[in-house]
Image: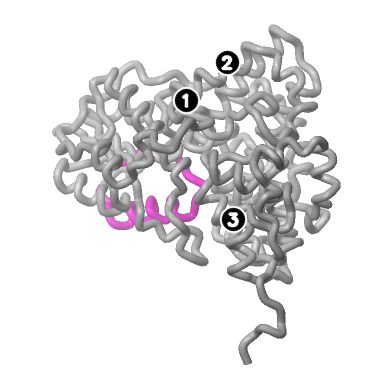
């Protein structure tokens, strides 16, 4: 009897360095390659999140198109369903007598809940998961997950004491072959997608990033073909442009590029051009990302809690008018307005810009940090569940920051990073200045 496998793609939209896909290639006779666009997703457990913003959805669409093209070289195809994985997989198990289910490990509690539910419902199936989104395997870390250090600095010091050259594995090659596809009914997913989300057809104007593993590989090679890495530490706090930082994060986020592939290219660059503080700092930033992945695995649902991983709640609340003005770039702070307009237009915001808008959201506007994190989840092309929610906790003072919270002097930051006001002018940050609140206590209804 033939073994039929189902591979559930999620944040591993690539063929190379994909351990679970390699495993599937060796164990089954036929394989269904599935991706689910779940518009009914319940989200982070405290409120219903907005649907994906147009830029993030466009990037995902391009990534799936590219994955489908890569699978076609193996005689395979990508099956895309516009429904919950629980619904789609149930139908496919019944229709095709699926015996094996594969996926990559995911730090998101929603994705973990889906997988656990499937395991409970289909005890007769073989389930396999592998890590594809992290640098290390859990067994390679110098501590157990329960003993994850409470700050990144402690994490980094422990990790850097290891023999990293021998511990960090080389990225895996793509499978030589894949099992034949099961004869799944063609739902013409690209047509359905474009009918439902017409902006994915290219109606948004020029995007900063093109989705897909092919585009990610091209960007990776292009970045290290120049000397940008040698000055990364000096330029990384820029606010605008494509060259001040690596811009690997969009492809890292949905797994069209693996962190180990970046490290491989970084090491080759250092061999060719020399290592310095800037090339080390690229690895340093990858370690920051790595820390938040394990932080998410450890704290699970606490990633979305108002009090975070701390023992006390912030003294903030939710003011709808302030939130609306912040999200539209319509606050009394020109640098914040420019950042938010950049985000809404491009789906991207620099690391410095993210810190500033988060600090403003929590400290100047007094807003519940989770609403800001949820808005970034909606808009960011490079949204990563652990990095996004972990960093917002960090800025709000309820996360992995021994100092308690990070509050930035917005005027001083603007003077440092936009001294000529070019960034604010480009994104029309000063053209929408209004009072923060349209009413005061005297206007409140009795």
Quarter residue 120 falls in = bottom left
Where is residue 374 drawn, in percent x and y? 55, 56
Q: Nearer the viewer, mark 3 or mark 1?
A: 3
Question: Which residue is nearer to you in this view: 276 or 50?
Answer: 50
For the record, the magenta segment spans 101-124
Are there few (<14), some (14-19), or many (20+) residues within 10 Å of tag 3? many
Which SS class for mark 2?
Answer: helix
Q: Residue at x 34, y 22 (%)?
A: 70
Q: Residue at x 78, y 43 (%)?
A: 154
Q: Nearer the viewer, mark 2 or mark 3?
A: 3
Question: Which residue is nearer to you in this view: 428 or 164?
Answer: 428
Vertical arrangement, residue 152 with respect to residue 326, above or below: above
Where is residue 45 drawn, in percent x and y? 49, 64
Of the numbered discs 2 and 3, the one sitting upstream in the chain is: 2
Q: Residue at x 64, y 41 (%)?
A: 427
Q: Is residue 182 left or right of residue 147?
A: left
Where is residue 28 drawn, in percent x and y? 25, 30
Vertical arrangement, residue 31 with respect to residue 231, above or below: below
Asked if one can make out residue 310 in the rendered structure from this viewpoint, the answer is yes
Specify whether residue 128 is painted magenta. no
Quadrant of the frame with the N terminus: top left
Are there few (<14), some (14-19), or many (20+) residues within 10 Å of tag 1? many
Q: Which residue is mark 3?
A: 327
Q: Nearer the viewer, mark 2 or mark 1?
A: 2
Quadrant of the frame with the C terminus: bottom right
Q: CA distance from mark 2 to mark 3?
A: 33 Å
Q: Which residue is mark 2?
A: 222
Quarter residue 78 falls in = top left
């Amino acid at each position: 009897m033939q073994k039929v496998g189902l591979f559930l793609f999620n944040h591993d939209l690539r063929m190379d360095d994909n351990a679970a896909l390699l495993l599937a290639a060796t164990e089954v006779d036929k394989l269904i390659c599935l991706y689910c666009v779940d518009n009914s997703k319940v989200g982070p457990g405290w409120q219903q999140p907005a649907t994906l913003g147009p830029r993030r959805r466009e990037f995902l669409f391009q990534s799936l198109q590219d994955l489908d093209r890569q699978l076609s070289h193996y005689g395979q195809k990508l099956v895309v369903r516009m429904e919950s994985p629980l619904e789609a997989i149930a139908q496919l198990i019944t229709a095709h007598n699926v015996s094996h289910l594969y996926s990559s490990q995911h730090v998101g509690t929603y994705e973990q809940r889906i997988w656990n539910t499937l395991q409970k419902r289909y005890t007769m199936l073989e389930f396999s998961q592998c890590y594809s989104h992290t640098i290390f395997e859990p067994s390679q870390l110098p501590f157990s997950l329960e003993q994850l250090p409470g700050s990144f600095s402690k994490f980094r010091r422990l990790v850097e004491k290891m023999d990293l050259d021998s511990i960090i594995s080389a990225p895996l090659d793509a499978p030589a072959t894949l099992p034949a596809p099961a004869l799944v009914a063609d739902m013409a997913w690209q047509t359905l997608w474009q009918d439902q989300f017409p902006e994915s057809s290219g109606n948004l104007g020029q995007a900063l990033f093109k989705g897909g593993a092919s585009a990610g590989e091209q960007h990776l090679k292009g970045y290290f073909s120049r000397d940008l890495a040698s000055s990364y530490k000096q330029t990384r706090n820029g606010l605008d442009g494509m060259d001040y930082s690596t811009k690997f994060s969009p492809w890292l986020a949905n797994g069209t590029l693996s962190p180990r592939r970046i490290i491989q290219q970084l090491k080759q660059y250092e061999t060719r051009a020399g290592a310095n503080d800037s090339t080390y700092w690229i690895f340093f930033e990858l370690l920051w990302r790595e820390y938040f992945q394990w932080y998410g695995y450890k704290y699970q649902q606490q990633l979305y809690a108002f009090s975070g991983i701390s023992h006390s709640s912030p003294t903030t609340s939710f003011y709808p008018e302030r939130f609306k003005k912040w999200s539209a770039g319509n606050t009394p702070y020109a640098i914040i307005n420019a950042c938010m307009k950049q985000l809404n237009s491009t789906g991207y915001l620099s690391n410095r810009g993210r810190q500033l808008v988060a600090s403003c959201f929590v400290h100047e506007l007094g807003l519940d940090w989770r609403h800001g994190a949820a808005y970034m989840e909606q808009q960011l092309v490079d949204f990563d569940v652990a990095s996004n929610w972990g960093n917002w906790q960090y800025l709000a003072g309820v996360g992995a920051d021994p100092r308690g919270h990070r509050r930035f002097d917005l005027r001083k930051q603007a003077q440092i990073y936009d001294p000529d006001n070019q960034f604010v002018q480009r994104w029309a940050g000063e053209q929408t200045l209004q009072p923060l609140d349209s009413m005061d206590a005297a206007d409140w209804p009795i």
